[in-house]
Image: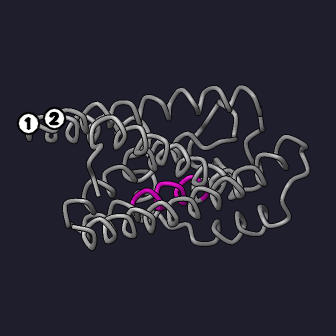
Amino acid sequence: MKPFLREWSLAALARWLVGLVVILGAATIFLGVAGDVWLQEGFAWDEPILRAVYTWRRAWLNAIMLFLTASGGRLAIIPVAALSYVVWRQGRWPDSVTVLASVGGAAVLTLALKALFGRPRPDIIPPLVIETTSSFPSGHTIMAVALYGLMAVFFWRQGHYGWAILSSAWALAVGFSRVYLGVHYPSDVLGSLALGVIWLAVILAVHDRLHQPHRR
């Protein structure tokens, strides 16, 4: 019995340490970006990256990026509804509630922070879509992490590692699409990815605490 408990404790400790490192790293990135945005200091690497990405534009790639960005915006309702329904049908109603809480909370968090920071949209390259809200943080990016990042965790926990990697990559691709389309600074997306990771960690911590107290 004691070796089993010792193994459980070491596994739990390892998970907590990895999680702590990830959260601290994400918090450091977000606070660094948010601080500079608040002080309006700007980032020397924003403009060169935007101009470099602008040279990659092609008609076929534009279509892909528009689809990717939509999957983190209005089209996100489709995977949200599908995922919620599937896990509910499997009897995993806590997971269904968690999906809705993750996405809904991300939307509220985005609106609040956009109003707080009020960063203007970039005007360095011609945007491929018109956006009227503030630039920081990127709502599409946070939404993508809240949704596809959560899907990645669910897939990983069920042993579907390939799908987990694909879901994680999708979230990153949505963030990149915002820079490609010229509607966000790279710093917007970087800070938003970090914030999305923090939010996802909070959601998962609450989920596991309330619904999976015996998870090892």
* Residue 51 vs residue 155, the one in the foreground: 155
Disc 2 secondary structure class: helix
Q: Nearer the viewer, residue 101 or 125?
A: 101
Q: Judge by depth and name the residue closer to the eye, 108 or 63.
A: 108
Q: Is residue 9 left or right of residue 177?
A: left
In the image: residue 192, left or right of residue 73 = right
The spot of residue 212 in percent (x, y) is 27, 43
How far is disc 2 from disc 1 in space, using C-alphas?
A: 6 Å
Local packing at callout 1 (Cα closer than 10 Å; few below 14, some 14-19, many 20+) is few
Do the CB atoms of the residues marked 2 and 1 lie less than 8 Å apart? yes
Q: Position of residue 186 (x, y in %)?
A: 68, 58
Query: Which percent across, then down, holds residue 89?
Result: 8, 36
Q: Callout 1: helix, strand or loop?
A: helix
Task: Give the number of callouts.
Answer: 2
- In this picture, residue 98 sits left or right of residue 92: right
- Residue 183 vertical position relative to residue 101 in the rendered view, above or below: below
Residue type at the position of mark 2 = Tyr
What colour scheme governs how the chains and residues are painted in the rendered image of this protein?
A: one colour
What amino acid type should be assigned to the residue bearing mark 1? Answer: Arg
Question: In the image, residue 213 lies at what x, y percent?
Answer: 30, 43
Reply yes or no: does residue 176 show up in magenta. Answer: yes
At x 83%, y 59%, the residue is: 43
Closer-to-camera residue (82/91): 91
Identified at 22% across, 41% down, the residue is 83
- Residue sitting at the far front: 2
Q: Quadrant of residue 74?
A: top left
* Prevailing secondary structure of the magenta residues: helix
Tell me, for residue 85, which label it has, or none. 2
- Residue at image x 57%, y 54%? 193
Circle 1 residue = 89
The label shown at residue 197 is none
Residue range (magenta): 170-179
